[in-house]
Amino acid sequence: MTHKRTIFFALILPLLWTPCPLVQYKFPGDEYFAFAISSIPGLWGMRFVSGDIHDPTLPLKVALAGALTAVIIGLLMDWMRVFKKTWATLFFSSIAVFCLIAIVLCFTAKNFTSTKSWGGFIPLATTLCLYFSVVISVISKILGLVIRKLRTQPDNGEVALPLHTECLSCGEIMQAGEATCAKCGWSYKAK
């Protein structure tokens, strides 16, 4: 059975991330910290533009550079065949956690909506959830591949042997790579 390659992440990551720094620039947070966090994938583009944070074209330039970064990360995730369900579960559950945090802040902080901006909270939460879901889903995919590689046996039907092993039939010590005991002829080969 062949698996059809898709470009799911190469499309969804830029679509979700690109609007965030554009909106976040309007609600930059204290010392532009929220804008900087939302702009991490596009910060390399700052090297090629003016360094003035007050430049009105800056968010567009950062968003375009970040969209390119998001496409590349998405293509890598598609190439690795990261599970869409794993990523979606991580993304939407972290969004739910951020929503609960916002609700708690609404009821505990006086005038949360007037002192803190929902326009700044939503893109920052979306960006942080994207970072979290991408990093954790890629790490889990890599760990899954490593564990599967460690569990699998060689394809030739033989059991992988340690450096020295003992024959199960006569107890003779066998060297690495020997699948048949020289003394009694017992074999490790799968039947």
Image (cartoon, rainbow, N blue to C red):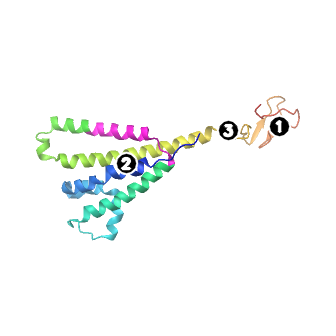
The residue labelled by disc 1 is: 180
Number of the label disc, if any, that sits on residue 105: none
Q: Main secondary structure of the magenta part?
A: helix
Residue 91: tell me if it is visible.
Answer: yes
Badge nearest the viewer, 2 or 1: 2
Residue identified by numbered label 3: 153
The residue mark sitting in front, 3 or 1, is: 3
Amino acid type for the residue under numbered disc 2? Ile
- 86 magenta-colored: yes
What amino acid type should be assigned to the residue bearing mark 3?
A: Gln
Q: Gap between marks 3 and 1, in whole Å?
A: 17 Å
In this picture, residue 46 sits left or right of residue 149: left
Residue 132, picture quadrant:
top left
Say if 95 sits above or below 31 in the image: above
Q: Earlier in the sequence, mark 2 or mark 1?
A: 2
> Start and end of the magenta stretch?
80-98
Along the viewing direction, whichever of 30 and 56 lies nearer the viewer: 56
The numbered dot on residue 12 is 2
Direction from residue 170 to residue 140 in the image, left or right: left
Q: Name which residue type carries label 1.
A: Thr
Quick one: SS at disc 3?
loop
The residue lying toward the viewer, choosing from 40 and 169, is 40
Q: Residue furthest top?
A: 169
The earlier-in-sequence mark between 3 and 1 is 3
Q: Is residue 33 visible?
A: no
